[in-house]
Image (spheres, helix red, strand yellow):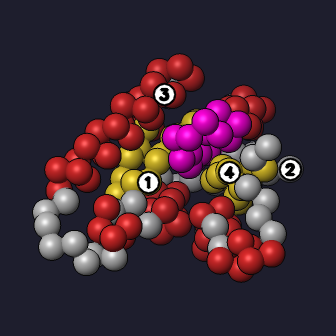
């Protein structure tokens, strides 16, 4: 079994996040590894396809601030230092890969809803992370 030293846990800040985080904490304890938390805020323009002729900067800033506050709450609850709490903006798969490489992570932990059929064909964040990662990925099945 590999020994992990740095574990990047990508959470979506929904009610399902604790399932993913708890599994990551178990792995960190078992390997005496450093825990990092990240949340990727997708750019507001993605949701509207860039078709809205208005400045969405304030809305984006509000989403970023709310995400930082929520991630900080998880960090404080589980003893994760501020430097290991990362909120970034972009495509989740790309940002998670970038962070994992920059921080020299040996394991990425993400949640997976266990999609089937057409949902599987459309893809998911967990699937995107798995197929582009240069380190191990643990997909925690959300129940």
Nearer to us in this view, 72 or 132: 72
Q: Which residue is mark 1?
A: 40
The answer to which quarter of the image holds residue 6 is: top right
Q: CA distance from mark 3 to mark 4?
A: 18 Å
Q: CA distance from mark 3 to mark 1?
A: 15 Å
Q: Position of residue 32 (x, y in %)?
A: 69, 31
Q: Which residue is mark 3?
A: 75
Can the viewer see residue 110? yes
Ranked by sequence position, the earlier of labels 3 and 4 is 3
Circles 1 and 4, Cβ within 8 Å, touching? The answer is no
Which callout, 2 or 3, points to the residue nearer the camera? 3
Circles 3 and 1, Cβ within 8 Å, touching? The answer is no
Q: Position of residue 103 (x, y in %)?
A: 47, 52
Q: Which residue is mark 4?
A: 111
- Mark 4 nearby-residue class (10 Å; few <14, some 14–19, many ≥20): many
Ranked by sequence position, the earlier of labels 1 and 4 is 1
């Amino acid at each position: 079994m590999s020994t992990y030293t740095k574990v990047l846990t990508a959470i979506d800040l929904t009610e399902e996040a604790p399932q993913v985080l708890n599994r990551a904490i178990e792995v960190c304890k078992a390997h005496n590894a450093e825990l990092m938390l990240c949340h990727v805020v997708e750019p507001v323009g993605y949701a509207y396809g860039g078709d809205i002729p208005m400045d969405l900067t304030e809305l984006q800033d509000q989403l970023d601030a709310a995400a930082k506050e929520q991630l900080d709450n998880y960090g404080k609850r589980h003893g994760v230092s501020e430097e290991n709490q990362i909120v970034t903006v972009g495509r989740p798969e790309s940002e998670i890969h970038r962070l994992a490489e920059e921080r020299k992570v040996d394991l990425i932990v993400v949640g997976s809803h266990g999609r089937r059929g057409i949902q599987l064909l459309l893809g998911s964040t967990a699937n995107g992370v798995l197929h582009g990662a240069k380190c191990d990925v643990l997909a925690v099945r959300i129940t």
